[in-house]
Image (cartoon, grey):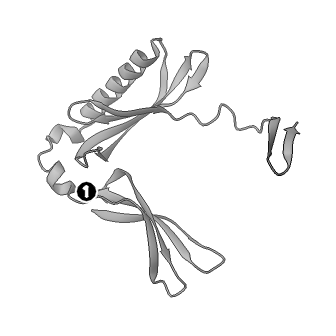
Amino acid sequence: TVVKELSKKVDFNRTTHTRVYQTYAGYPVWGSDAIFHANAELKMNDMNGIFYRGLKQDLANTPHYVFTAAQATKALKAAVQHTRQRVSEKFTTTDEQTKLVVYVDHLKQAHWAFEVKFKTSRIKGLPAIPITLIDAVTLEVYEYWNDLKTTSSELVDGGGVGGNGRIGRVIYD
């Protein structure tokens, strides 16, 4: 296991906040990241986040084919099929990506998995960017979500009702 730095910032109190993530055998450990907080003398005051132990034991008997392009292609096909079953609609894909990661399940068991991401043509009238975390050996789906953040990089004017008990009701236009 290796910890790699993502970013480092110093705040107005001269506290250094270093964002890091965990890797195993050069692959990212999905969901394992932390922020170290160090004072001006660079003595660590605090840490927020998650790191995992015991990865080597959990991943010891991994079949060699997990690390092949052919298995990544199988994972991509399985993820697309899973998305089609969920939406019950035909669509085309572009920008397909597969990334091998270590996934730690709710029982704290580590697995090799593929993080599969692709763009779709419109599903139910809307674009989508499904992400599927799928077991690299069994192709079982661990997690699935639509990672589309917005349909445009343009700013959109919006309005509505807001406010609170102190200032009362406010209408934003």
Q: Can you say which quadrant of the picture contains the C terminus?
A: top right
Residue type, label 1: Ala
Which of 86/127 is in front? 86
**Is residue 111 shown above or below 138?**
below
Which of 77/130 is in front? 130
Please name the residue shown 21% across and 39% down the image. 66
Q: Secondary structure at mark 1?
A: loop
**Is residue 4 shown above or below 113?**
below
Residue 52 percent across, percent down from the top left? 29, 58
**Is residue 121 shown above or below 100?**
above
**Callout 1: few (<14), some (14-19), or many (20+) C-alpha neighbours within 10 Å?**
few
Residue 161 percent across, percent down from the top left? 81, 36
> Does 33 sit left or right of 137 as displayed?
right
Residue 137 percent across, percent down from the top left? 20, 35
Please name the residue shown 20% across and 58% down the image. 54
Residue located beneath label 1 in the image: 25
> Does 86 sit left or right of 102 as displayed?
right
Please name the residue shown 15% across and 41% down the image. 64
Please name the residue shown 44% across and 69% down the image. 47
